[in-house]
Amino acid sequence: MKISPIKILTFISILGSGIIVNAQNTDKKIYDIIDEVSADSIEHDIKKLAGFGTRNTFSDTISDTRGIGAARRWIKSEFDKISSNCNNCLDVFYQKDFVTPEDGERIPKEAWVVNVVAIQKGTKYPNRYVIMSGDIDSRASNTMDFTTDAPGANDNASGMAGTMEAARVLSKYQFESSIIYVGLSGEEQGLFGGKGLAEYAKKNNWDITGILNNDMIGNIEGVDGVIDNRSFRIFSEPVPPTETEQERRMRRFYGGEVDGISRQLARYIHKNVETYMPEMNPMMIYRLDRFGRGGHHRPFNDLGFAGVRIMEAHENYNRQHQDIRTENGIEYGDVVEGVNFNYAKKLTAVNAINLASLAWAPPAPSKVEIGGIVEPSTKLKWEPVKGEVAGYKIYWRDTTAPQWQYSRFVGDVTEFTLEGIVIDNYLFGVAAVGKNGHESLVVFPTGTFR
């Protein structure tokens, strides 16, 4: 007897006289992806990147052994090698922009900010992309100092190594949508690499589902004394900065203060991790980034794309942006010894399973609208997804709940009424479900009808 790769786990609860069944799909291939991520491979890549001495954006570009030039050429060669092992399944190229001191106070001289991009094209939606990024560059205590050693083992060789490892693992599979693995430069000087790629994406009309920005995924020993190899943070802003004044006015009456596209991406990751990696502790942080700081997902957010930052839960500031030295018995510097490779493996797997799930899922429904004012029920309608789907799932939750609590699969329809569910008491969204069981991001209603 042939068994489907989709395993249905059914949870049944009795509510009054009715039975509500919530089915959670799990795909064996996702567990295989988790198992295929290698801590040894990540360790090798982190040590190789740290071994370039410094990867400051303005460091040596000629040497084959030192500086950002050597680092980005090696990263490209690794992506090329991965591509050759999957029958040239990756389109690997440099994307670059020129910067001068007039572009920012952290730019000491003219230079090219060069990103290394590897695109694994989707079979069904090739212009629809989900992105994983790490940063190539590193810095010493003085970000303008491009000659002092700055190995940047955790910040951010860990994120770059994780991105390369995700490419190695996922290149063995085929996906409906495209996946981009990218090393971004110029992060420490002002997020220039992310800005350049986001503008490139906009210019080329990329349909971006979201970017998973990985910045520091290898430290488990915080400067606060906590040692934790299971918790990690997902930073996401509440609503896009590109929203219109009309959309802002609508929120006063219809809600949605924490339901923007980046927040839905964060919820998707959180749910997927709880389903497939229950040993991990994903922490939703309701903020664009750490307090007053920024990461390479922000330039994408600035242009209206969904994006989150994935990183360790407990930072060690003695190892960040520090010259290598010992003072008063305290060791400073972002060296390899401060990285936990098994933890970096776990967070790489977090990325890989979400890249895969989103790339196997259909596009999200569009033009989701809601109705049901002064009625004992809630109505939703949406535009159908182009392509075959199994149907759609409506999600809802208490207005104070951080995650979607309830759901109902309603079939391949474009309108549905939730009888007895009062619109005033919940927040709602709709996701598309593929025939393989994978779901799109949840879409919060942006319009109303009667």
Image (cartoon, helix red, strand yellow):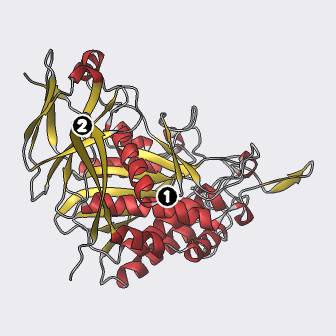
Question: Element type at marker 2?
Answer: strand
In this view of the protein, which residue sits in the foreground, 197 or 435?
435
Find numbered disc 1 in the image and state the secondary structure of the residue it sits on: strand
- Visible in this render: residue 136? no
Residue type, label 1: Gly
Residue 152 placement: quadrant: bottom right
Q: Earlier in the sequence, mark 2 or mark 1?
A: 1
Q: Position of residue 404 (x, y in %)?
A: 34, 39
Does 424 sit left or right of 161 as displayed? left
Q: Nearer the viewer, residue 161 or 344?
A: 344
Q: Position of residue 192 (x, y in %)?
A: 47, 47
Instruction: Give the Cα separation between the discs numbered 2 and 1.
Output: 31 Å
Q: Which residue is mark 2?
A: 429
Residue 449 is situated, as x and y percent measured from the top left of the image, at 9, 24
Residue 396 position by quadrant: top left
Disc 2 crowd, CA 10 A, few/some/many (<14, 14-19, 20+): many
Tell me: residue 61, above or below residue 295. Answer: below
Q: Specify the quadrant that holds the N terminus.
A: bottom left
Q: Which residue is situated farthest in the right direction here?
A: 328
Q: Is residue 331 above or below residue 17?
A: below
Q: Quadrant of the C terminus?
A: top left
For image coordinates 34% across by 71% down, the residue present is 29
Residue 134 bears which disc, if any?
A: 1
Is residue 423 visible in this depiction of the protein? yes
Query: Callout 2, which amino acid?
Result: Gly
